[in-house]
Amino acid sequence: MSVGRTWAVSLLGIQGSMVEVEADVSQSLPRLVIIGLADRSLGEAEGRVRLAANNSGCRLPTGRITVNLSPAGLPKAGAGFDLAIALACLAADARLPLASVASVVHLGELSLDGRLRATPGILPAVLAARDAGYPRIMVPAANRAEAELVPDTEIIPIESLRAAAIWHGADLEPEDHDAPLMRGGLEKSTEPASAGTASALIRSPPEPSLADVLGQTDAVKALITAAAGGHHLGMVGPPGTGKSMLAARLPSLLPDLPIDVALEVASVQSLDGARFDSGIPVRPPWEAPHHSASVASIIGGGSTLIRPGAAARAAHGVLFLDEAAEFPAHVLDMLRQPLETGEIVIHRAIGAATFPGRFQLVLAANPCPCGYHGEKARRCDCPPQSVRRYRGRLSGPLLDRIDIQVRVHPITSAQLNLARDSPRYDHQALREDVRLARERAAHRLRDTPWTRTADVPGSWLREGTHRVSSAMLSPLDKAFAAGRLSMRGYDRVLRVAWTVADLGAHAAPTLDDIGEALFLRDGLTV
């Protein structure tokens, strides 16, 4: 007998590696042995594959079947190798053409009756296979829409192991639930098909509007600046002042995601079990975990199959932490590395999984346990030590990474009456201001790897071709000399100043722009 070969994909985070699945049959006691650093769920494929094959009418060969997953040193996890293992075994028994099975990447988990289950992580797996030069990929029919989002691939959706064997040339009759698929044009083609990704983009239902906000001029200005530059935002104020309301409107100010970015976002969500039957969303994601969330739920984790947390799912969107001071301090401090590098790296014994981590962090917190410290309209009854302890839950290194920090005060009755009689915020006009500011920044950064002001390194701002004159930087230099700013804070204020200049259509930050950026930075100390 010959060795049956095919291909599968091993995922570590959203990064996929090609795995060659080899099967050999020898004369010995019946047994299926899987070698090649498989985890427990993959090691249990023996029972699933054998029963699925028997119940599909394509019984595995008798004797000892050895399945090797190569490269042997690469950890493999999950049940997504079932289909590849089953077809490699059938090819080794000469039940299927060796060349046909070897020409296709096979992904999917088998149920005991031979059906293919919807498998998490199909989208990043298909992307990895295409990028490695394997454009023909067989997937569960339930994952068809998701897999076809990847361009320049030929996706073969299959309902069952029996249908997969028939597609490869087995002399079997299709079952009733397989017949429509087999008649639907799954004949082998000679050229890969290009998926129409652009036509598969979807938009979310209508998003909340800034027209619902009354007053809060400084907070709205901070929100628009954060949206225009991709900056992190912190808001402190008493309960009921609209912090959560404002944060929920930040995603609606952001532009649609480019196709490649939308695919990356969808890849992370696919690992978490999301389905994309009607297409992938192009609106920036929004994640708002509860303050009781653990490190694993915020950052991600897992011993063998590493899952993304809320921060990874919020990549290229907004991560909102309401009641931020109620989060455990060690959970908040775990965000410091992603905020600095734009990546989330989770180290486990099987390796290091990397997820995208370039999100906009929005913090909302009360100034003290009762929520009214520093307010004139209502007295705070918290002891000074309690106030200091409560504020200390937001560590200095974390706050130093927050570009814009504003104090949100409750509006007075006079301000409420004035807001009622004044025109509401024009949400579409403000969103257009954000779009134009981002276009100005992208044009300025057209010869660099960056597109948003928040992503530009401080060294480039201070020493690059677009550096600001010393005279304009004098307010920043004074704040730095007085100890109000760290070097990181200095660079972040300079980034915000560029964003303010972009909103004002200025060629470079003016003294007023830098003064406004400093004001937006000092808000939490007011």
Image: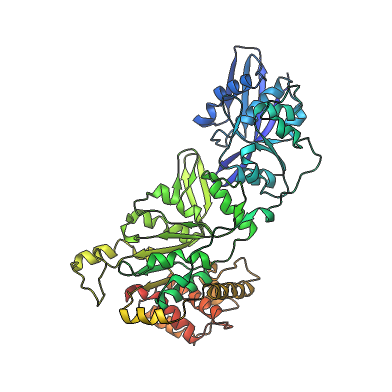
Residue 89 sits in quarter: top right
Front residue of this view, candidates 336 and 235: 235
Left or right: where 38 falls relative to 181: left
x and y, in percent, of residue 443 in the image: 64, 74
Front residue of this view, candidates 510 and 380: 380
The image's colouring method is rainbow
x and y, in percent, of residue 186 in the image: 75, 36
x and y, in percent, of residue 23 in the image: 66, 24
Front residue of this view, candidates 65 and 116: 116
Front residue of this view, candidates 197 and 199: 199
Q: How many marks?
A: 0
Answer yes or no: is residue 134 visible. no
x and y, in percent, of residue 246 in the image: 42, 68
In which quadrant will I find the C terminus?
bottom left
| x 45%, y 39%: residue | 303
- Vertical position of residue 66 compared to residue 378: above or below: above
Left or right: where 326 falls relative to 28: left
Q: Residue furthest right?
A: 190
Answer yes or no: is residue 246 visible. yes
Left or right: where 161 falls relative to 399: right
In which quadrant will I find the N terminus?
top right
- Vertical position of residue 77 compared to residue 505: above or below: above
| x 62%, y 65%: residue | 449
Left or right: where 93 falls relative to 509: right
Q: Residue furthest front?
A: 421
- Vertical position of residue 456 compared to residue 62: above or below: below
Residue 130 sits in quarter: top right
- Vertical position of residue 249 compared to residue 101: above or below: below
